[in-house]
Image (cartoon, rainbow, N blue to C red):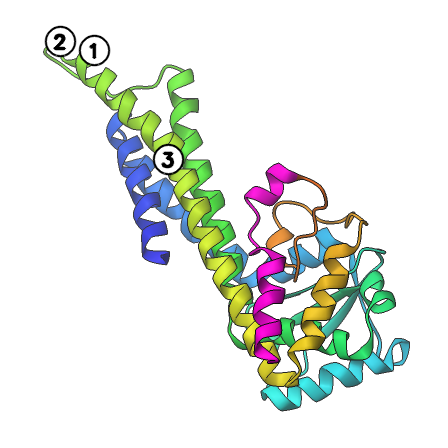
Amino acid sequence: MFSLFFVIIIGLGWFLSYYFDDQLILFLAVGISVFMSFISYWFSDKIVLAISKAKPLAHNENQELYHIVENLCITAGLPLPKIYLIEDPAPNAFATGRNPKNAVVAVTTGLLQTLERTELEGVIAHELSHVGNRDILIQTIVVVLVGAISLIANMFMRGRFFGGRRKTSNGEGGQIGAILMIIGLVFLILSPIIAKLIQLAISRKREYLADASGVLLTRYPDGLASALEKISRSPIQLRTANSATAHLYIANPFKGKKLINLFSTHPPIEERIKRLREMSV
């Protein structure tokens, strides 16, 4: 799937460079994807925490939460991540960071107030599984690549709007230009859609994996299942959530937005709960 991302990016860059008769565009397209991947690898966690308005949580501020994280990290064989708190009544949580040594687990105040200990353990185990499975890096890179594809695709329409086009001779400009315009429109429409579908496929698969891996840590699937039920029933909208960070949370942070839920990076929460209940049988 990552190879397909880069094929789309390079394909768009090649098409634009051919259409506008400028090879610099191809190098620019590849450069954008590499640069955005570099930024996402080294600074994604800081960007996400800033967007989410998360603040570091000291050990003496919530010793129970720290003990839960410490015990699960010992079971999973992971280093203790940094723990952040988001002042928001909506129950939710996410993990971020480029690797286990630089991982961060963030929880909302609403999550701490809503869940019981076994349920909180299920949520933390799920997030630590994202850390152990390297999902936090995969999900970030995927988002950045989707953004790069959308950016490069938009370059075509912007260039076309300002009159840019490939210089041709022998009167073939009109016919070739029309054909290339059709091809460009297909690229423009389909590339971001295909990239988004790949993102959805990766994110949803990793959510199911994190659920299963989390159960292996707690040995109690009902804890996570009950937590997901409470989170899904909460009518409170997470104020700091947006389309760029929504995929990181344990459950879709958007409430009552059918169009957004249709393209959610999370699998249906009912299906996740069903699978967890089946594990406890």
Crowd band around label 3 with a 10 angstrom C-alpha radius: few (<14), some (14–19), many (20+): few
In front of the other: label 2 or label 3?
Answer: 3
Q: Amino acid at mark 1?
A: Gly
Q: Secondary structure at mark 2?
A: loop
Q: Secondary structure at mark 1?
A: helix
**Is 273 colored magenta in this rendering?**
yes
Residue 138 visible in this rendered orientation of the protein: yes
Quadrant of res 168: top left
Measured Cα–Cα span from mark 1 to mark 2: 7 Å
Please say if 72 is above or below 107: below
**Residue with the mark numbered 2:** 171
Q: Are marks 1 and 2 in contact (CB under 8 Å)?
A: yes
Place of residue 279 in the rendered image (x, y in percent of width and height, measured from the top left): 57, 78
Place of residue 214 in the rendered image (x, y in percent of width and height, measured from the top left): 61, 77
**Is 255 colored magenta in this rendering?**
no
Measured Cα–Cα span from mark 2 to mark 3: 30 Å
In front of the other: label 1 or label 3?
Answer: 3
Q: Amino acid at mark 2?
A: Gly
**Residue with the mark numbered 1:** 174
Residue drawn at the location 56% of the way across and 69% of the way down: 275
Place of residue 205 in the rendered image (x, y in percent of width and height, measured from the top left): 48, 62
The answer to which of marks 2 and 3 sits earlier in the sequence is: 2
**Residue with the mark numbered 3:** 190
